[in-house]
Amino acid sequence: MRIITLNEFIIERQADFPYAKGELTRLLSHIGIAAKVVNRAVNKAGLVDILGEIQEFNSTGEQQKKLDVFANEKFINALMASGECCGIASEENDSIVSFDSDLVNDGKYVVAMDPLDGSSNIDVNVSIGTVFAIYRRVSPKGHKALMEDFLQEGTKQVAAGYIIYGSSTMMVYTTGRGVNGFTLDPSIGEFCLSHPNIEMPQSGIIYSINEGNYLKFPLGVKKYIKYCQEIDKQTNRPYTFRYIGSLVADFHRNLLKGGIYIYPETASNPKGKLRLLYECNPIAFLAEQAGGIATDGRANRILDIKPESLHQKAPFFVGSRRMVMQAEEFMSLTSDKREAEAPRNT
Ligand code: AHG
Ligand code: MN
Ligand code: MN
């Protein structure tokens, strides 16, 4: 079988967009390059203690940097170098980063990203990821990027994807024409097409939610969890529970096998935990492109939410179409919108 590298594939697909001039192609290629650099650092993360500061961690002669800060810098540098991206919103930066140089001010794209997702898993050698969403800027070219370029609905995404640093490293992305996955072959240092046209099963048997927060969940979620645990041969229940604690890894598994991921609202966090711009939106775009759906658990499509601030959160229900719709039904049947934070100790 002929090997198709990520770059070959991106260039081939440029023809899907008759007016494309190669800008998005260049941008995606640069994301692929940064992914390889970050992958190398992730692979060496466990060696930090015995080897001291790893070179890349120490480029400025400072103390060892946290891997998420390192990943942030690498992705920002790569996107800036592409010349096609005029600014970035990142989990690691309080405000937007506008590049503001003559070269990049002409870039017509902005990128929102979580450079390292699932960072609590780094120290224990468990899968982590990078998530990105690409938008066409709405402010005029030739000037620096503005906040309004980032506060666009998820439906406006031009492309989105993630890199998963797992038992192998993969990049999965969409430009709105289906979802394709590429596995990094370390022997040649290239991402190779391994999962063409990924389609998410319409239903599955996996549910992923942090059940440690059970007492804080809305009643509809509690009832849905009980539904998942009930025995019913016809619907393949009880379902299997799997939760890694890296959205990228949990979603990736459910994307391939079928399943649902939920991070709901709680009384103390009425918008949940996940960030709309660079966690929910790109994952929702991928889910929809693969035949799944993503909502906030209150019958609102994630991609339709108009963002009001950069780091805004949203409750997140994503995965196989029939499973998310079932969870939505449980949410709509419960009259009390949200249960009390936790039962009082009496
Ligand atoms: P990050 O590491 O970028 O801060 O994101 C962690 C997120 C997400 O990846 C994961 O699904 C979720 O937080 C896990 O949260 P809990 O530990 O509350 O379950
Ligand atoms: Mn994250
Ligand atoms: Mn992060």
Image (tube, grey):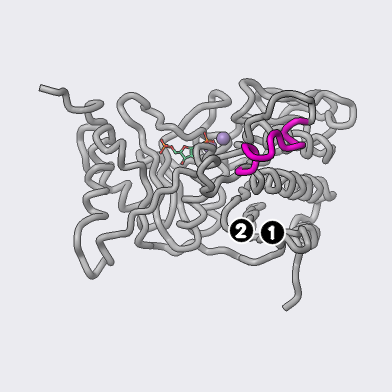
Residue 210 visible in the snapshot = yes
Specify the quadrant of the image occupied by residue 230: bottom left
Circle 2 sits on which residue?
Answer: 168
Residue occupying the far left of the picture: 346
**Farthest residue, direction right:** 102
* Residue type (three-letter) at the residue carrying disc 2: Ser
State which quarter of the image contains the N terminus: bottom right
| 285 to 305, vertically: above or below | below
Q: Label 1 to label 2, Cα distance in Å?
A: 7 Å
Asked if marks 1 and 2 touch (Cβ < 8 Å), the reply is yes
Pinpoint residue 292: horizontal percent, then vertical percent: 47, 56
| Image position of 321 (left or right of 255) | left
Report crowding for label 2: few under 14, some 14 to 19, many 20 or more residues within 10 A (C-alpha).
Answer: few
Q: Is residue 108 visible?
A: no
Q: Which residues are magenta?
A: 46-58
Q: Which mark is residue 184?
A: 1
User: Which element carries disc 1, helix, strand or loop?
Assistant: strand
The foreground one among 21 and 44 is: 44
Identify the residue at image location x=83%, y=28%: 105
Q: Is residue 40 above or below residue 214?
A: below
Which quadrant holds the C terminus? top left
Q: Tell me if residue 162 is in the magenta stretch.
A: no
Q: Which mark is residue 7?
A: none
